Image (cartoon, grey):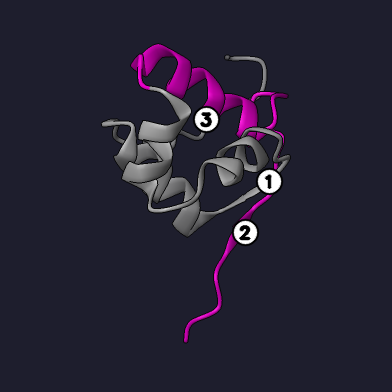
């Protein structure tokens, strides 16, 4: 099995769990619905929301379960 890459937060000075939680809140689905789409138990959602960092694989799964696409940009410091 290939080793999972870890994306270390914070991103935009915000932990990855917070970014996922904000996207989930905007989705209008319940934690139970999100957990079902993600293929995890509901208590795992709370752990994800509290995460400072997240694996690339889990991030991809969360984004897809929320019906979003992941976009990565590299910008020059000071041009945010």
- Precedes in sequence: disc 1 or disc 3: 3
The stretch in magenta equals: 1-29
Depth order, front residue of 8/68? 68
Q: Give the left or right position of residue 59, taking residue 6 as reference.
A: left
Q: Secondary structure at mark 1?
A: loop
Can you give x and y, in whole percent of width and height, for residue 30 in the image?
41, 23
Observer able to see residue 47: yes
Image position of 30 with respect to 63: above or below: above
Q: Which residue is mark 2?
A: 6
Can you give x and y, in whole percent of width and height, for residue 20 in the image?
52, 30
Q: Quadrant of the C terminus?
A: top right
**Disc assigned to residue 20:** 3
Q: Give the left or right position of residue 31, taking residue 19 as reference.
A: left
Image position of 45 with respect to 22: above or below: below
Please say if the residues under marks 2 and 3 sit with CB atoms less than 8 Å apart.
no
Can you give x and y, in whole percent of width and height, for residue 73 in the image?
45, 33
Magenta span contains residue 7 = yes
Calculate the distance from the C-alpha at mark 1 to the C-alpha at mark 2. Answer: 7 Å
Please say if the residues under marks 1 and 2 sit with CB atoms less than 8 Å apart.
yes
């Amino acid at each position: 099995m290939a080793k999972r890459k870890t994306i270390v937060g914070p991103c935009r000075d915000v932990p990855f769990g917070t970014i996922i939680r904000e996207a989930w809140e905007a989705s209008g689905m319940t934690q139970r619905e999100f957990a079902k789409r993600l293929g995890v138990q509901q208590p795992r959602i709370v752990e994800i929301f509290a995460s400072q960092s997240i694996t690339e694989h889990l991030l991809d799964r969360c984004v897809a379960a929320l019906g979003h696409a992941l976009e990565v940009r590299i910008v020059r410091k000071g041009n945010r």
